[in-house]
Image (cartoon, rainbow, N blue to C red):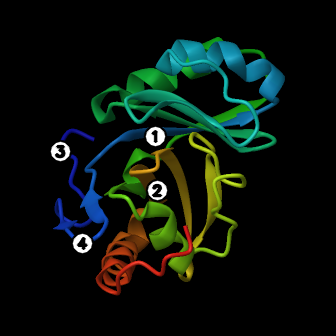
Amino acid sequence: MSDPRSAVGGAVYEGYVTVKDSGAHGMITLRGDHAELAEAVKAAVGSGMPTQRRIEGGLGGGAAWASPDELLLFCDYADAAGALEKARKSLEGNHFLVADVSDARAVFALEGSGIRDLLAKLCPADLSPEALPHGEFRRSHLGQVAAAFWLESEETATVICFRSVAPYVYDLLSEAVKGGPIGIF
């Protein structure tokens, strides 16, 4: 992990929404009984425990609810090994799984006033403001691949996918932006 490389080389596409490769970020999968994980989250990334389908904090230090027994922790890329060890030590004696998945994921930033519209072209989920409020962590699909995303505001969002499909996701988002907004949000 000493020489992180972006999956798509820092690519940026500018349209009605800007699609930007966010580079390397530290990410840790933490699985176990949610009732036992709060102390580990605080120790590892300094964040509070997220409630169901929410994210606390952000890419620089946060935690997202991924499923009833899974969290995704975020930290700086260089801090991932230390955060992993802090989580492990905090959970000694409990049943858990903790793994550094930093190099297995790619992150894209979306910026612009048509983010919901863009994601609606590619995702089968309800993206209305009532169904996807700011800060809700959504796991779904973009096109044919698994992805997760959240909106920080109506003009900023983060998309996470597996590194192996990052070029596909970047191209998919960029091509969808070229088509212009469809105007449903």
Residue 136: x and y in percent read: 63, 44
The residue located at (52%, 79%) in the rendering is 121
Asked if marks 1 and 4 touch (Cβ < 8 Å), the reply is no
Mark 2 and mark 3: span between their CA atoms?
20 Å
Asked if marks 1 and 2 touch (Cβ < 8 Å), the reply is yes
Looking at the image, is mark 4 or mark 2 earlier in the sequence?
4
Which label sits in the foreground, 4 or 3? 4
The residue located at (33%, 31%) in the rendering is 76
Question: Regarding mark 1 in the picture, which secondary structure is present there?
Answer: strand
Mark 1 and mark 2: span between their CA atoms?
10 Å
Looking at the image, is mark 1 or mark 2 earlier in the sequence?
1
Question: Regarding mark 3 in the picture, which secondary structure is present there?
Answer: loop
Identity, as a three-letter code, of the amino acid under mark 3: Asp
Q: Nearer the viewer, residue 5 or 137?
A: 137
Which label sits in the foreground, 4 or 2? 4
Which label sits in the foreground, 1 or 4? 4
Identity, as a three-letter code, of the amino acid under mark 4: Gly
> Residue 15 has which mark?
4
What residue did someone put label 1 on? Answer: 27
> Residue 3 has which mark?
3
